[in-house]
Image (cartoon, coloured by chain):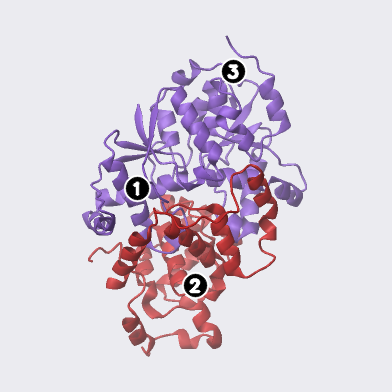
Chain colours: A purple, B red
Amino acid sequence: MNYLYYPGCSLEGTAVEYNISTKRFMREVGANLIELEDWTCCGATAVESISSLLSLALPARNLAIAEKAESADEILVPCSACYLNLKKVEEKTKKDPEVLAELNEILAEEQLQLKGRVRVRHLLDVLSRDLTPKDIESRVKKSLAPFRIAPYYGCQCLRPYPVFDDPESPRSMEPLIEATGATVHSWKMGTKCCGASHMNTKMEVGLELVGAILKGARGADAIVTVCPMCQINLEAYQNKISKINGEDLQISILYLPQLLGLAVGLQEEDVGLDLNLAVSKEFHKKLTGIDILA
Amino acid sequence: MKSRSLKPLTPSLKERSNHDSDKGRNMSQSPQKENEYETSPPHDTLAPVKDMVRACIQCGTCTGSCPNAFAMDMTPRKLWRMVLLDRKDEIFQSRTFTLCSACYYCTLRCPRGLPLTEAMGKLKQIAARENLKAHKKSIRFYKSFLDSVRRHGRVHEMEFMTLYFLSMKDPFMPLKFTSLGMKLMGKRKVSIEIPSREPNSLEAIFRKVEEMEERI
């Protein structure tokens, strides 16, 4: 399995453990990730608030670079915001040749051209459809049976383009979590918005949204995410939110490939677990208490 | 450029000043006349948003699906009606459009299949282009982000937050983020170094986009 790989800016900064664990876990299951050369920012969610044309041009540049690399025709994207921006270009250029022509006029500035040959895929899409739960089960060295895990999907890997899961009631993470031996925490908050950049510009609204998600996770040992924005919103403000709500809402937050990596026997540092902002002592304790399967 | 979906949001300056003198213009009826330019952009800037929501049947599915509706002073359903009625003052004095976090629930569920999240984005673009004072926090945040991208090709989180704090000129604002900043630095996830200009600047692409947006 060869995939072109677009990590995106967050995975070089606040979400570096998502990068580490994605690469390491994919290698573990025999997938080959080829990082795009000279990739640039997709525009994140900020660009749509400034210019529609730029919001397509920035991801288009990366897709054009991906097309030049002939080693694979699918591009794997772990960040949901990057994924949606790239996917939007794929969808819009497929439907409207005029959009494609306009983007190519811009890309000509860098002697690049977009034809529409590369398929954009979210990490969760690849994990849930290109692998089978058996692929993971057969590699499990550390059964995560003592853990109850809440799957958090967030928004932009599901909506507005329903590609690999039901955008209202997604289930794609469940077989993956179960394959590790862990129990799935059943809840209704897995598709609710974390507030995205509200935490920076309208913090009181962000705190309210994240508070509701943390409350929904009561009883779980950890929430797993597939997006750097969701991850940092869920992990970084737990003290403040606990104080506002008058109850302890602290919970461990992991990226999905970190959880899967731990199950297949990778060490905590192999999946960058020391870099997370919210991994509780109890979580570590449970983890070290598990015997490694022969 | 013929594409409808990529039509620029604002008319050229010349067109705009013509519209400004239209007698049918209702902005002069605003009770807050002195502030009107700070909150209200010129006349027909709403046209592309109107095109997107013209088929709205006012069912309220968008409001019922919106995670941020609780914090809005005008529901999304009402906002679309205001767009169609050309009530610019109400729209841009309200903070409803700035509260869209692009979760795409409304877009997914709209029974008329309207691109409502995109329409919210268009309203944000109008506010940014007109540099409306009432929304300066969000506008500066997005602009700081893109400044960083334009220069370096990739986002440097610490630089862009620094640009944002500087542009807000609020000495207390960074304090809200100090503890997170320290945590991130402790994990060596961000550094306080501001990177120098790098070869993968996106200047050419940004310029070309600006040129094309001016063209019509």
Q: Which one is earlier in the sequence, the residue at label 3 or at label 1? A: 1
Chain of the residue under the numbered disc 2 shown in the image: B
Residue to which mark 3 is pinned: A142
- Label 1 neighbour load within 10 Å: few <14, some 14-19, many 20+: many
Q: Distance of mark 3 from mark 1, alpha carbons? A: 38 Å
Dividing the picture into quarters, in which one does residue B202 lie? bottom left
Q: Quadrant of the C terminus of chain B?
A: bottom left
Residue lying at 33% horizontally and 76% vertically, measured from the top left: B11
> Helix, strand or loop at disc 3?
loop
Residue lying at 54% horizontally and 75% vertically, measured from the top left: B133
Residue to which mark 2 is pinned: B91
The amino acid sitting under disc 2 is Ile
Chain of the residue under the numbered disc 3 shown in the image: A
Residue lying at 44% horizontally and 69% vertically, measured from the top left: B81
Q: Is residue B59 visible?
A: no
The amino acid sitting under disc 1 is Asn
* Residue B193 spot, x, y in % from top left: 57, 54
Task: Give the foreground label among 1 and 2.
Answer: 1
Could you say which disc has been placed on residue A62 in the image? Answer: 1
Whether discs 3 and 1 lie on one chain: the answer is yes
* Residue A270 spot, x, y in % from top left: 56, 28
Q: Distance of mark 1 from mark 2, alpha carbons? A: 35 Å
